[in-house]
Every structure is written in C-alpha cells, then in structure tokens.
Image: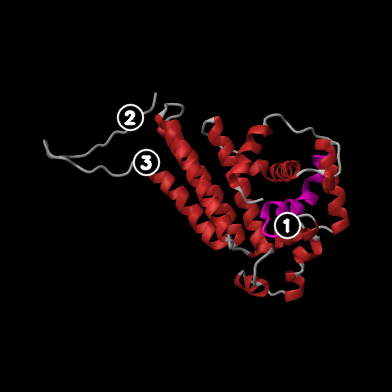
Amino acid sequence: MTEPYIVTGSYVVQREHALQDSPLDRALELMEGSALRFSLDAISDEKTRASYIKNIQRMSQQTRDDVKAGKITAQEGVKFSHEMRNKIMVEHRKFTSAQGLAIAQRKKKGGTELKTLLNMYSENLFQNGYDSLSEVEKNKVHYTILESSGRDNAKFSAGTKKMLIMGKLGVLVTAALATYQILNAENKPKEAARQGIIVGAGAFGGVLAGLGVSAFCGPGAPICAIAVVLVGTIAGGVAGEAVASSLDEELEEFTHWDIF
C-alpha cells in the first residue's frame, strides 16, 4: 500500500487550504534541478542536452508512477530521488574541478592499444572483431565498457527494478558526459584555465585526437568516445567475463538516451 501523505497544523474549518508540495514532489524537483544545472554546464550539444533532460524526467515520472501504484512507499521514492541527485552532483563537481581533468587525462591510451582492447571486448561478446560489428553490437560493446567502469558508483538502496535500471543508466551517462566534455571542450585552454589549471593548448587540445577516437566514433558521439577513453582502465578484469543476461534490460534502457 502507498503511504498516506499527512499534513499537520492549525486550519480554519470549512475553508479550502492549499497544500505544499509533498516530500516526494520536492525530492523529484531537486533531482531534476540538479540534472538541469549539470546539463547547462556540462553538455554543449543542444540535442544531447535535451535527450538528457527528457530521460531524467522519465525517471521522475517512473518514480511517481511506482509510488502511486503501491510498488514502493513514498519514503522510498524520496530516498531514491535524493540518492540520484547526490550522484549527479558528484559528477558535476568532477566536471568543475581540477581533479576531474586530471582523472580524465590519466585515462587516455594509445590508438593501437585501444583497437586491441576494443577487439577483445568484441570477441568476448560476439566472437568477432570490432570493425565487423553492426551499430547495435558496437553500442552493446560501448555500454559494457561504461557499465564495467561505473557499476560501483551506480547502486541505489531503494526503488523498483525499473527505477534502479533507470537510475543506473542515469549515473553512467552523467559520468560519461562529464568526462567527455572535459576532454572535448570547444575552447580547451579556456576550459583548463576555468578549472584552475595551467596547461598548453597542445597538451590539452590533443587529448582526444591522440586517442584516435575519430577512427572509432562518428562526430557528436560522446558515449562511443568516452567508451574508447575508458576501455583501457577496466580491460583487465573483464576480458574473461560473459555478459550477464540482466544487462539486456539495461541495454534496452540505454537506447532511450539517444546520445551514442
């Protein structure tokens, strides 16, 4: 059963009184607000930003629907919303910090090494090389890399299965977009200076170019690009793993984000 929303206080009888937003509504507003702030600061592409906000709003609606249906309590919905907001804020802070840039730069790998690692994932998943995969199969490779790199930071303590999947994808995509924007800022020297770092234009501007990302990803494909950046940091523990069947639902959710 859904918990009742109880309002206490002194009220004049036989009069209508406007009620304040419920704790759940307020928690969801805060979650959406943090996502909007992140999107304005960290996502330069208008289409990608719109997709990001739309999916956060889908998450809010799913939470409301599950509470209304009695699948979880309103308190659990509030807890999920606060956890999601906090995780978005963590990634936002990474984007605006010197540490975030340092972490992103440390993840770069050489082009030849990257190709080997991508092929390793592809062989493990599809028994075929990366270049031979369809776009759908490549997206599965990209998601597997994202999931492996961020699963420990994408856990929630409350929510329905659908909410947990949506929340996990929200965290993974937020982290990927923050890292992508750090590495691919339009004005890289200015971006570095804004974060309090003194680096040469060549040192910072060549990060993605040095990765050979364009050889793997088309223009405006942040998820693909950041998967390429991340692949070298997690390959060791994933080479022999089979993809769990539970990832199918996550992959289906992944397609909603439309930012490959």
In percent of width and height, residue 63 lies at: 46, 37
Give above or below for 190 relative to 175: below
Name the outermost residue toward the top: 1
Q: From mark 1 to mark 3, how far is it between C-alphas?
A: 43 Å
Q: From mark 2 to mark 1, how far is it between C-alphas?
A: 50 Å
Q: Residues within 10 Å of mark 1 (few under 14, many from 20)?
A: few
Q: Which residue is mark 3?
A: 23
In this orientation, which residue lies closer to the viewer: 104 or 50?
Answer: 50
Q: From mark 2 to mark 3, how far is it between C-alphas?
A: 12 Å
Which of the marked residues, 1 or 3, is nearer the chain's N terminus? 3
The answer to whether residue 154 is visible is: no
Q: Point out the stretch of residues depicted in magenta.
A: 218-239
Type of the residue with mark 1: Gly
User: Dot 2 lies on which element?
Assistant: loop
Type of the residue with mark 3: Pro
Q: Nearer the viewer, mark 1 or mark 3?
A: 1
In percent of width and height, residue 212 lies at: 81, 60
The reply to whether the magenta stretch includes residue 235 is yes
In percent of width and height, residue 100 lies at: 66, 60
Q: Residues within 10 Å of mark 3 (few under 14, many from 20)?
A: some
Which of the marked residues, 2 or 1, is nearer the chain's N terminus? 2
Residue shown at the point (45%, 39%) measured from the top left: 61
Q: Which residue is mark 2?
A: 4
Question: Dots 2 and 1: beta carbons under 8 Å?
Answer: no
User: Dot 3 lies on which element?
Assistant: helix
Q: For residue 3, what is the image quadrant?
A: top left
Residue shown at the point (40%, 31%) measured from the top left: 68
